[in-house]
Amino acid sequence: MLDVNKIRADFPILSQKVNGKPLVYFDNGATSQKPQVVIDAISKYYQEINANIHRGVHTLSQLATDAYENSRGKLQNHINAKFAHEVLFTSGTTHGINLVANGFASILKPGDEVLVSALEHHSNIVPWQMLCEKTGATLRVIPMNEEGELIMSEYDTLLSDKTKIVTVNHISNALGTVNPIKYMIDKAHEVGAAVFIDGAQAVPHLKPDVQELDCDFYAFSGHKMCGPTGTGILYGKEAWLNKLPPYQGGGEMIKEVTFEKTTYADLPHKFEAGTPNIAGGIVLGTAVDYMNEVGFENIQQQELELLEYGTQRLLEIEGLKIFGTSAEKTSVISFNIEGIHPYDIGTIIDKLGIAVRTGHHCAQPVMNFFCIPGTIRASFAFYNTKEEIDIMVEAIKKAQLMLS
Ligand SMILES: Cc1ncc(COP(=O)(O)O)c(CN[C@@H](CS)C(=O)O)c1O
């Protein structure tokens, strides 16, 4: 059981006031807040060991390199990757998806099919559309139902020997649906397709085991799991990463450069061109340590209580409809209030210190499915409380009165 007050003391921003009111931060799906240990680690890096990595012979460069590669090892253990060189540092989920989609440009041909789902974030739609435009492959969509769940019978039907990639989020950012990715991965492999999992919304809530899942790729962002922005991880099976061409050319990713020909570095550096976000990569390891110290079982228990309590309290509000009602959900509640635009609620409760997200959440196809312009999304983290939910519900009731 979490001591939430003790946890909250780790996050300086949570004691901030916004518009003169205590901050109630319910936009964790967009980015999480950062514990003091993460904030301090960034300063410590620049105060003590800042140097460029993998190149210098001097001590500082070696210290920075060791810290960076030690962090890679932490991430490898965190997601249970077989090899450290299967764990690539990126700037975030979007970067990871584009790295792989661009790699497949040299593999796909007309007639091949890429399967995405109706629940996807734009970052896991657009790169694959660009890939299909480049290669003549066809994008096909796994449909969802009114509960916001992917329809597995339709998925099974869509799979064929033409399917070369299946790409789906582990957890929907717009609705909170937890997708049955192990089933989807196994079925995709039966037809020889590679599977890319967008784990952006999963890693704040669970520890993915990429070997148990047997996914071919798994991408996520550090900033959603108490880490710095501009950091992320792309996991790829060694065989696939050796097969894909590099996404960017430059320093670090080469063995030898001549004007006649360049040979590329081995994994992971083949995909890590240029000077990386060194501080960010090191501190992502600090964030992973922090989340593991809190404990993902404790996190899941706290967030389940917040989801259940938040759902119960919000449904007290007349005219409120929740979108995303799967039994398999994480702590995200997307909702609208009859006759009121989500934006209006969001802006009014912001004046009361409450931060939610309103709009399409970079998931316009999801909103189109429900024929709505967007929703109000409250996304809870382990450092939120039931008392904060009470404050939000009372604020929404006030806003509803003002707007009716
Ligand atoms: C499922 C999913 N997939 C990819 C991304 C992109 O993550 P980046 O760190 O921006 O690269 C996100 C980020 N979703 C944020 C910002 S739009 C949200 O408010 O929901 C996501 O939720």
Image (cartoon, rainbow, N blue to C red):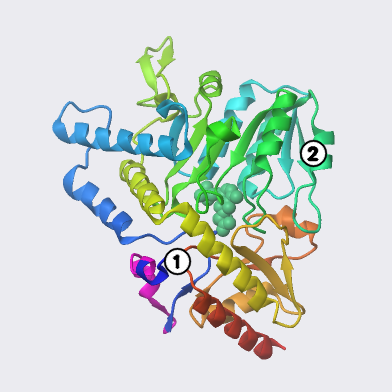
Q: Going 63% across and 59% down the picture, which residue do you hit?
A: 361
Give the amino acid type for the residue marked by disc 1 in the picture: Tyr
- Three-letter amino acid code at the position of disc 2: Tyr
Please identify the quadrant where the C terminus is shown.
bottom right
Please report the residue visible at 42 percent of the width from the left and 47 percent of the height from the top. 230
Q: Could one spot residue 109 in this view of the protein?
A: yes
- Which of the 4 quarters of the picture holds residue 338? bottom right
Residue of label 2: 155
Q: Name the spot of residue 370 as percent of width and height, x first.
A: 79, 61
In three-dimensional space, the C-alpha distance between marks 2 and 1, rounded to whole angstroms, equals 36 Å
> Badge 1: few (under 14), some or many (20 or more) residues near its Cα, within 10 Å?
many
Indicate which disc residue 185 carries: none
Give the numbered dot on residue 383: 1
Query: 78 or 341, which lies in front?
Result: 78
Magenta stretch, residue numbers: 7-20
* Image height of 277 relative to 314, above or below: above
**Residue name at image x 50 percent, y 33 percent:** 235
Is label 1 in a helix, a strand or a loop? loop
